[in-house]
Image: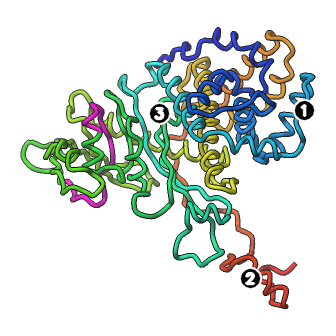
Amino acid sequence: MSHTNSLVPMRQVGGARQQFLQEPGLPFATHLPAAEIHSCCRGLGHGFRQRIFTPAVTLWTFLSQVLDPDHSCRQAVARLNAYRVGRGLRPSAPDTGGYCKARGRLPEELLADLTRTTARHLQDRVATPWLWKGRRVKVADGTGASMPDTPANQKAYPKSKKLPPGVGFPMLRLVVVFNLAVGTVLDAALGKFQGKGHGEISLFRRLTGILERGDVLLADRLYATFWEMAQVLAVGADAVMRLHAGRAAVWFRGRGHSTANRRIWWQKPLRPEWLSRAEYAKIPQWLCLRALRVDVRQRGFRTRRLVLVTTLTDAQAVSHADLADLYRRRWQAELNLRSLKQTLQMDILRGQTPAIVRKEIWAHLLVYNVVRTVMAQAAATAGVRPDEVSFAGALQTLNAFLPELRAAQTPEDAAVVWEVLIWAIGAHRVGNRPNRYEPRAVKRRPKNFSRLTEPRATARQRLKHGAKRTGKKR
């Protein structure tokens, strides 16, 4: 399959060299220019003064903090001061107070809007060979993240009621919709990890407008409900999901049906509490869907057979093999979440307040989209699909080249460094392991310490009064 090299024209990159040399937000100054950031701030009613930590500089510093393996505020401020001194500018105070206050003033909506904007801009330029049958596929999935155990975080994102006070950490739930072709985050919703109205499906329903006519929604069995299918059909889109475990099994037998492909009808259930009477009346009484059985023949795979349901009922236009291959690519969402949580270290957040925690989530998603944009340009230059380029390799290469980009004295020097950066990212490919399987076990042994099942202050008091230490003797 041939791939186009016109996703992000190189002349657009060359025109941004002078801005590269003037702004401390590498590589964010190109994809998130100061004018766009400040315009968005004014649109949100956020006023600011022209000091060192303008919204643009604060946001760039925040994103560089997420991009760097060292997520500390001290490292972010030190990096900013090093850049300013190298350009003959007055440095800010070396302590983190000014930066943290400026970061606290950033509107949360600014980070969310920029995340959606970067994804939309790249989605509009996706090369046709990267699409599935000429259609955009959007993948929905959910995950969780923990945060520091502060009173404010506990109140906003309470821990499990099964845990005693002082044990465990507050958790939040995050639902993300990815673009399958380029891997960017199109939108996200977050809330409490448990409680009514905060489940994965409830958070997904908050993402109104995420689906457009002609899109294909790809999701696991949790999303295969009557209401999600009806919502997809209402906007003129389609869906491919695994049959929900709570639904009756589909029998692939009977007159007029093939052994692994048949039409099914879902009847509208009773009106749920979250749906108004007017909305309920607009939903059709029956949905005509298509079910197909997929037999997994690879040895070592945990699942041997699965049943898919889809709104794509035309078997001539979309074959059984097309849908089976598409659903197999749903695993790309799990890999994208792994890139966010492990490679970008979003698994354990650092914010001491709920507001900073939410901004930290959106900052990770925004950095992730910027890296994916650079990866898409590298993939187009190399003539491969974006999912063939390693995210970890792209992040490592970007971090390694940033000092050289900052040190470039002329646009020509920056152009050379940038072109080598794109070439290097395109050379880092993921392994071609389509049928890989691994045991669900960890080889490296954990440290020989027991779990902390009481508040830390209580445990310290026991040690102070002569309690015996637990764990391996040294």
Q: Label 1: state its secondary structure.
A: loop
Q: Which mark is residue 265?
A: none
Q: Residue 458 carries which label?
A: 2
**Residue 157 versus residue 335 in the image, above or below:** below
User: Which badge, 2 or 3, is on the more N-terminal residue?
Assistant: 3
Q: Is residue 219 visible?
A: yes
Tell me the residue that label 3 is attached to.
179
Is 132 left, or right, of 82 in this rendering? Answer: left
Crowdedness near tag 2: few (<14), some (14–19) or many (≥20) residues, C-alpha within 10 Å = few
Q: Is residue 263 visible?
A: no
Tell me the residue that label 1 is attached to.
91
Q: Which region shows up in magenta? A: 232-250
Is 433 left, or right, of 276 in this rendering? Answer: right
Of residues 28 and 143, which is closer to you in this image?
Answer: 28
Crowdedness near tag 1: few (<14), some (14–19) or many (≥20) residues, C-alpha within 10 Å = some
- Residue at (63%, 66%) from the top-left corner? 169
Q: Position of residue 94 (x, y in %)?
A: 90, 42
Residue at far left of view: 255
Question: Where the C terminus falls, by quadrant?
Answer: bottom right
Of residues 343 and 82, which is closer to you in this image?
Answer: 82
The answer to the question of whether label 1 and label 2 lie on touching residues, with beta carbons closer than 8 A, is no
- Residue at (37%, 34%) from the top-left corner? 211
